[in-house]
Image (spheres, grey):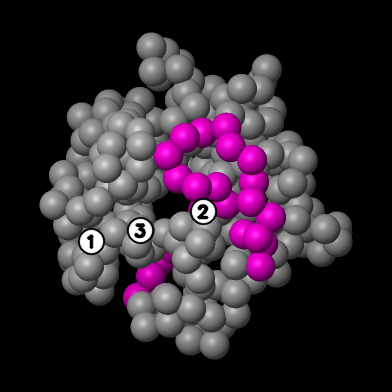
């Protein structure tokens, strides 16, 4: 394993009344994870492009936009214009996935694909070489605070194998139920980017929790810990 583990706090777990403060709390993270839900693809409704603009004004960190929406082609341009640095769309919701990924890239934004827990890794075989990131959901999308689904570990490994076979190197991001208690096994499976919401924003000291999780993950990456 190489490179460092990246920690991406999910503002789904932040206090929206004190968003600027909470962004300051996590300013030493690597990315800010921004969940877009339309109330159709999932049973929840979250943030639009105006909130993304507000986040961008209050942080220098790259903005990692996860689009949990039924029609990403209809909405993706809004988030490109609002300042997204990375946009991931769900394989399950994308009718013309290659076109969507190409559109994002043409606008100078990195692009990735998300897999729900029941979606196998092999569906990415024809697109993985075009991706900057693959996001493996380790919970069913829609709400924070869920428990990690253990079967995600095998899928992370499968995505990594598929990428290596294709000569590709997308970042592998994992989202859902990850904390200091299980980050080592997630990184050992092949994760590069760890999304954490309640584990960070629910901590007494979010900054210290980010450093703790990063240190645990990097120890696995460096081969110092066999998780």
Tell me the element at label 2: strand
Assess whether residue 102 is covered by the magenta stretch. Answer: no
Tell me the element at label 3: strand
Residue to which mark 3 is pinned: 90
192 w.r.t. 176: above or below: below
Q: Tell me the quarter of the image containing the N terminus.
A: bottom right
Q: Taking 90 as reference, is 192 left or right?
A: right
Q: Give the residue at x 45% y 17%.
A: 15
Residue 78 image-quadrant placement: top left
Q: Give the residue at x 47% y 66%.
A: 119
Looking at this view, is 151 or 130 the one in front? 151
Magenta range is 130-154
Relative image position of residue 217 (x, y in whole percent): 72, 51
Residue to which mark 2 is pinned: 137
Residue 113 image-quadrant placement: bottom left
Relative image position of residue 180 (x, y in whole percent): 73, 39
Residue to which mark 1 is pinned: 104
Tell me the element at label 1: helix
Q: Give the residue at x 28% y 37%.
A: 39
Total labels: the figure holds: 3
Relative image position of residue 107 (x, y in whole percent): 18, 59
Q: Nearer the N terminus, badge 1 or badge 3?
A: 3
């Amino acid at each position: 394993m190489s490179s460092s583990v990246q920690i991406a706090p999910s503002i789904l777990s932040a206090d929206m009344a004190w968003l600027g403060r909470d962004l300051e709390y996590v300013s030493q993270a690597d990315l800010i994870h921004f969940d877009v839900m339309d109330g159709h693809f999932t049973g929840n409704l979250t943030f639009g492009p105006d909130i993304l603009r507000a986040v961008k004004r209050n942080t220098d960190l790259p903005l990692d936009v996860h689009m949990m929406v039924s029609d990403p082609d209809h909405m993706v341009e809004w988030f490109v214009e609002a300042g997204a640095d990375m946009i991931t769309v769900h394989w399950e919701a994308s009718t013309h996935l290659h076109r969507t990924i190409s559109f994002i890239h043409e606008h100078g934004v990195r692009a990735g694909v998300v897999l729900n827990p029941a979606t196998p890794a092999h569906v990415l075989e024809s697109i993985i070489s075009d991706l900057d990131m693959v996001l493996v959901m380790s919970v069913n999308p829609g709400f924070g605070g869920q428990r990690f689904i253990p079967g995600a570990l095998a899928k992370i490994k499968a995505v990594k194998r598929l990428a290596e076979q294709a000569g590709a190197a997308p970042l592998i991001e994992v989202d859902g139920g990850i904390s200091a208690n299980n980050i080592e096994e997630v990184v050992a499976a092949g994760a590069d980017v760890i999304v954490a919401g309640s584990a960070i924003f629910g901590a007494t000291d979010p900054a210290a929790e980010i450093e703790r999780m990063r240190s645990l993950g990097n120890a696995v990456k460096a081969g110092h810990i066999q998780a």
